Structure formats: C-alpha cells, structure tokens
Amino acid sequence: MDESGKVLDFHALRHSFITAVVQSGATVKEAHELARHSTPLLTYGKYAHMSLNDTTRALNRRPDSSTLGAGESKTTGTDDAQALPPTGHPTGQQPVRNETNAKS
C-alpha cells in the first residue's frame, strides 16, 4: 500500500493477464501453459473472464450460415410432427411396469 492508500493487487493482475491471453486467440494449451496452472479448467474456470464484447466477437467469427450446406435440406423431425399424448407414450397408454424395469 502506498501513502495514498492504493494497493497493487498482483492476483488481479494475473486475472487480467490470463484474460488478455485468452482474448488474443490463444489455444487452451497455450493459455494453460502461460498461466502455469495444474489444469486448464482452473485457467478457464477461474481466471479467464468473458464480456459481452468477447461473446459478440466470437459469434462474428463463425462461418456464414447461409453458405453451410447450400442446396441441402435436412429433415429435423419437427416438421408436421404430431404431439405426443399427455402420457408421453406414442400409443397414449401408460408403459407397462414389470419387475425388470420397475424402480425400487
């Protein structure tokens, strides 16, 4: 602490450094090595911080979806699908429970 009461927090500096490394586009392995942590989970879970600008930038880097699968049309299984009855079983009946599938 200096005479004005300001404190240099080296741990906060570590968070800022690792966040900057991740924002630079470093791989998980590179960020983990530079942080000198025991696991990448520690590096990314505790030290790398994301802002709204970071997530927006990541979304803007994704490929143009209009060119993906151009000319192809895949069925998703939701078009004209019939809703299941309230039981959740396609026949509308409750599934039969027997000793092999009953829960204790």
Image (cartoon, rainbow, N blue to C red):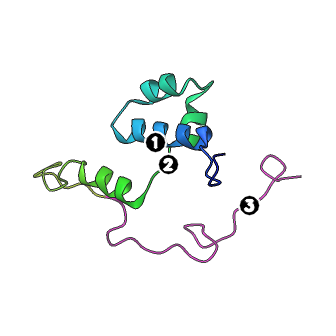
Which sits earlier in the primary sequence, circle 2 or circle 1?
1
Give the labeled residue for mark 3: 96
Instruction: Please state the horizontal and vertical placement of residue 32, each as a whole percent of the image.
Output: 51, 27
Query: Is 18 in front, or is 97?
Result: 18
Q: Dot 2, how many residues are within 10 Å of its Cα: few (below 14), some (14-19), or many (20+)?
A: some
Instruction: Tell me, for residue 19, which label it has, or none.
Output: 1
Between marks 2 and 1, how big is the CA–CA gap? 6 Å
Instruction: Please state the horizontal and vertical placement of residue 93, each as a whole percent of the image.
Output: 65, 71
Q: Residue at x 39, y 29 (%)?
A: 27
What kind of residue is marked 2? His
Q: Which residues are magenta?
A: 76-104
Instruction: Please state the horizontal and vertical placement of residue 102, each as a whole percent of the image.
Output: 82, 53
| Helix, strand or loop status at disc 3 | loop
| Helix, strand or loop status at disc 2 | loop
Q: Residue at x 59, y 43 (%)?
A: 8
Q: Dot 1, how many residues are within 10 Å of its Cα: few (below 14), some (14-19), or many (20+)?
A: some
As displayed, is residue 19 above or below residue 73? above
Q: On the picture, is 64 further left or further right than 94? A: left
As displayed, is residue 72 above or below residue 91? above
Which sits earlier in the primary sequence, circle 3 or circle 2?
2
Q: On the picture, is 98 further left or further right than 55? A: right
Membership of 63 in magenta stretch: no
What kind of residue is marked 3? Val
Which sits earlier in the primary sequence, circle 1 or circle 3?
1
Membership of 97 in magenta stretch: yes
Query: Is 10 in front, or is 84?
Result: 10
What kind of residue is marked 1? Thr
Between marks 1 and 3, how big is the CA–CA gap? 54 Å
